[in-house]
């Protein structure tokens, strides 16, 4: 013990933890720049999540809650902390792990082994749903058909719906996912870059604990949590990758950038002249949709008809184009941005 | 000096899929102390077998790589200026993957 204390004195971490004043500090909290020790870090980290849950009245005792679990660090930390807080603060929740098998060989099949271990480690029942069962297509099949572009578009849309369907199957009341602050900041940026006002307004409206990805990693590492960490083999071409690199570089120059981007996203006010999509249901499958057919059905239809580009690119024609007859077209020949129905810009 | 290097979060794939490396690092000529800056360049030359750009950017780690020296975030000890001593444990974790 003495030797390591001497070492840390030499390395400049000679102060004690700002919170407990007893132990040696191991990291700097980005929000407050305080130097804190491991135990205080755990406490602060877990308490922040607990406070968001309590202040927003997220759960009621007796509710069934599904945790979207992929075996990655975000969902592993989420499952660990939520089940711990459920116990510690007696939330009275019935927790489940819900995993989606997209059918990505060499990636998902490995991470599912991790979730199966999590099921035993945390004592949470696990339900796995596959794209094959739900849609008749695995991601491997889809990529063979569409090539290496737009993979995340298909996967993301299908997975979101798969999670909701899984939640309905488990008859849960709530679904929680492990999205972190970096993810949300990337999403805000992506929606700005694409001019997707509808998604921009929605992406910060869901209750999120804004935890930095770096902190999640540190927590998972110190706690020696069992998680799977490899990049999805289809992700290198994703547009999100650019937003991610940019944000990571930005974070280096200005650590507050991530939380500030999210704040901008939250505070955006949409011009009153912009037409926003209205929530309805998909005519084909009954899922929520702002168009006649939900995105998953459009994409699936394209795949089944051998038209991989359907639903990708600007929606001028195709399945959803026909349903825009009610949009008022301006008298002038040119199309102005104001007349475009929001949410119809698609890349 | 004898050091233990740990690679996680996918970085192990750059070093023959070995997560833990026990290494012997000699101080560069005329230098009294080994800093993280020196160590990084040593690691890049001697341990990283492929795609060094996933590990290093310029003379520091790529943004998104967490560095812990003896279980302590290197931001507390001066990042590149951190001095490394015999028997130290240095951990590199990449955060750049899905979760």
Image: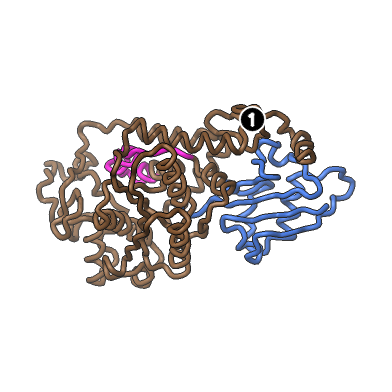
Chain colours: A brown, B blue
Q: Which residues are magenta?
A: A190-211
Left or right, B30 with respect to A34, comes to: right
Left or right, A251 with respect to A190, comes to: right
x%, y% of residue A296?
A: 25, 59
x%, y% of residue A90?
A: 38, 39
Q: Can the viewer see residue A321?
A: no
x%, y% of residue A86?
A: 40, 42
Mark 1 highlights which residue?
A: A17
x%, y% of residue B76?
A: 67, 35
Mark 1 lies on a secondary structure that is loop
Instruction: Give the quadrant of residue A14.
Output: top right
Residue shown at 13%/54% (left/top)? A323
> Which class describes the residues within 10 Å of circle 1: few (<14), some (14-19), or many (20+)?
many
Q: Is residue A119 magenta?
A: no
Q: Nearer the viewer, residue A127 or A285?
A: A127
Q: Can the viewer see residue A301?
A: yes
Residue shown at 71%/56% (left/top)? B44
Chain under callout 1: A
Residue shown at 77%/45% (left/top)? B84
Q: Is residue A200 magenta?
A: yes
Instruction: Give the quadrant of residue B46.
Output: bottom right
User: Given the current orientation, which residue lies at the most extreme left position?
Assistant: A326
Residue shown at 81%/54% (left/top)? B2
Q: Nearer the viewer, residue B90 or A311?
A: B90
Instruction: Give the quadrant of residue A129.
Output: bottom left
């Amino acid at each position: 013990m003495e030797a390591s204390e001497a070492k840390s004195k030499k390395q400049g971490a000679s102060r004690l933890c700002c919170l407990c004043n007893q132990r040696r500090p191991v990291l700097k909290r980005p929000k407050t720049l305080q130097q804190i020790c491991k135990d205080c870090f755990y406490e602060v980290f877990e308490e922040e999540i607990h406070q968001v849950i309590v202040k927003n009245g997220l759960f009621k005792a007796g509710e069934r809650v599904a945790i979207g679990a992929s075996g990655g660090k975000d969902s592993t930390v989420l499952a660990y902390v939520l089940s711990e807080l459920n116990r510690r603060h007696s939330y009275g929740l019935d927790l489940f792990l819900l995993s989606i098998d997209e059918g990505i060989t060499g990636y998902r099949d490995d991470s599912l082994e991790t979730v199966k271990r999590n099921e035993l480690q945390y004592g949470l029942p696990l339900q796995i749903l596959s794209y094959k069962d739900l849609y008749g297509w695995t991601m491997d099949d889809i990529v063979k058909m569409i090539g290496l572009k737009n993979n995340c578009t298909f996967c993301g849309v299908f997975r979101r719906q798969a999670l909701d369907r899984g939640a309905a199957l488990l008859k849960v009341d709530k679904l929680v996912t492990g999205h972190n602050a970096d993810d949300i900041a990337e999403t805000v940026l992506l929606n700005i870059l694409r001019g997707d006002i509808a998604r921009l307004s929605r992406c910060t409206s869901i209750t999120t604990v804004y935890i930095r990805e770096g902190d999640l990693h540190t927590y998972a590492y110190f706690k020696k949590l069992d998680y799977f960490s490899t990049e999805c083999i289809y992700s290198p071409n994703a547009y999100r990758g650019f937003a991610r690199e940019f944000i990571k570089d930005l974070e280096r120059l200005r650590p507050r950038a991530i939380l500030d981007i999210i704040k901008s996203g939250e505070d955006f006010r949409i011009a009153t002249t912009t037409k926003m999509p209205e929530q309805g249901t998909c005519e084909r499958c009954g899922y929520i949709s702002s168009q006649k057919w939900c995105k998953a059905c459009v994409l699936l239809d394209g795949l089944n008809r051998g038209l991989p580009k359907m639903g990708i690119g600007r929606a001028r024609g195709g399945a959803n184009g026909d349903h825009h007859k009610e949009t008022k077209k301006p008298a002038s020949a040119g199309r102005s941005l104001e007349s475009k129905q929001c949410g119809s810009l698609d890349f | 000096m004898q050091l233990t290097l740990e690679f996680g979060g996918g970085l192990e794939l750059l070093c023959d899929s070995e997560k833990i490396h026990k290494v012997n690092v000699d101080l560069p000529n005329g230098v009294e102390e080994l800093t993280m800056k020196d160590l990084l360049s040593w690691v890049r030359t001697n341990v990283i077998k492929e795609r060094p750009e996933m590990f290093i950017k310029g003379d520091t780690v790529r943004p998104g790589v967490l560095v812990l020296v003896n279980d302590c975030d290197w931001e507390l000890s001066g990042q590149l200026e951190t001095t490394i001593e015999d028997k130290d444990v240095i951990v590199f974790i990449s955060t750049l993957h899905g979760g």
